[in-house]
Image (spheres, grey):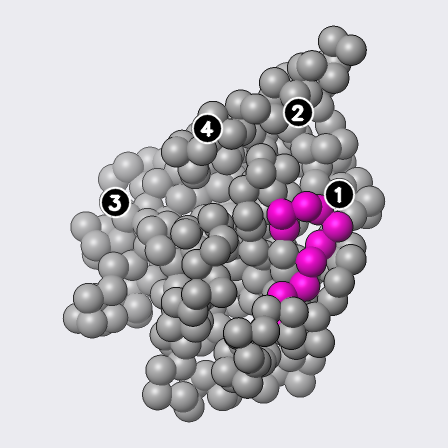
Amino acid sequence: MHVIPVISTKGGEGKSTQAANLAGFLADASLKVLLIDGDYAQPTASSIFALKYEAPKGLYELLMQTADLNQPSCIISNSVIDGLDVIISNDPHAQLPTAMLHAADGRLRLRNVLQHPLFQSYDVIIVDSQGARSIMSELIVLAATRMAVGVVKPVLPDVREFIRGTINMMENLLPFSALGLKLPDIRILINCMKYTRLARETYAQLEEIIDDGRYSAHSEKIKVSLLSTFIYDLEIYVEGHAAGQPAHRLEKKTGRVSDSAFSTMYNLACELFPEWKEQFDLITSKEQEVKNG
């Protein structure tokens, strides 16, 4: 079971959209996926896809430990996408940050809760996070099993904010290594890539900063790398959001220079989960069979 946080301390980077798109692709590959909407302030991930069943409880009860996890239907919502379950965000009065700040195990609460047998049945748990630095972002990062996906737009102020905010947050979590916890590797996903000189130059600067380890004085402990897959700034992702469908279902092929949404999500899934490439290839094969009639 993989727990993959999708993070950035800056809002508007596209975390929720891409967390949902990735979850939808993995579910279509016959993996059992849980999408946790961890953005208590502006929940989006849990509303992108329609729910055929909405549980009466959600993130609030999960972290406050008031839900009976032996009764999955009380907290697990089912999306219209087969294989994709959801835990909705339901903390409109923002009570969770204060509660977690004062709880003895606050920053470890999500990590501990996800050890319950209910969650061990999932292949992948994707956790969307708030676009701000807070204890909620920290507890989501600490729940990761091996890596977190950092979403960044190829705009210099956004790159600087990612290093200043997200990487600094990771530095502040280093003391947890004394408890035997290894911080997740950060895999940076470039979102809304553009066909411009400025975007290419910004990406080159970010690549140089990462290669030189200049993103942190503790680069030997905080591992950061760039994913090869880019999410281009395309209308299809907006259309997918509006239609309540994963973008890969809406765009199988394209005449553009950039890959189709299907190819993009396939490449991203293969990069993050190479052990399941054969299952991802099966989706491609099925699409080819449909195309050939």
Percent across and percent down for residue 77 are 68, 63
Range covered by the magenta-colored residues: 75-84
> Label 2 is placed on what type of residue?
Ser
Q: Position of residue 236 (x, y in %)?
A: 75, 35
Q: Residue furthest top?
A: 292
Q: Which of the numbered marks, if any, corresponds to residue 260?
A: 2
Q: Is residue 216 above or below residue 104?
A: above
Answer with mark 4 or mark 1, whichever residue precedes in sequence. Answer: 1
Q: Disc 4 marks which residue?
A: 277
- Earlier residue among tags 3 and 1: 3
Q: Amino acid at mark 4?
A: Lys
119 relative position to 37: left or right: left
* The quarter of the displayed image where residue 288 is located: top right
SS state under label 1: loop
Residue name at image x 61 percent, y 18 percent: 285
Give the distance between the C-alpha atoms of the residues marked 4 and 2, in whole angstroms. Answer: 18 Å
Q: Real-space Cα distance between discs 2 and 3?
A: 33 Å
Q: Earlier in the sequence, mark 2 or mark 1?
A: 1
Residue at which label 3 appears = 213
Which of the two labelled residues, at mark 4 and mark 3, occupies the earlier sequence position?
Answer: 3
Residue 194 x/y as whole percent: 62, 32
Can you identify the residue that label 1 sits on? 245
Viewer-nearest of discs 4 and 3: 4
Mark earlier in primary sequence (2, 3)? 3
Q: Residue at x 43, y 73 (%)?
A: 113
What crowding class fits label 4: few (fewer than 14 Cα within 10 Å), some (14-19), or many (20 or more)? some
* Callouts 3 and 1 close, C-beta under 8 Å: no
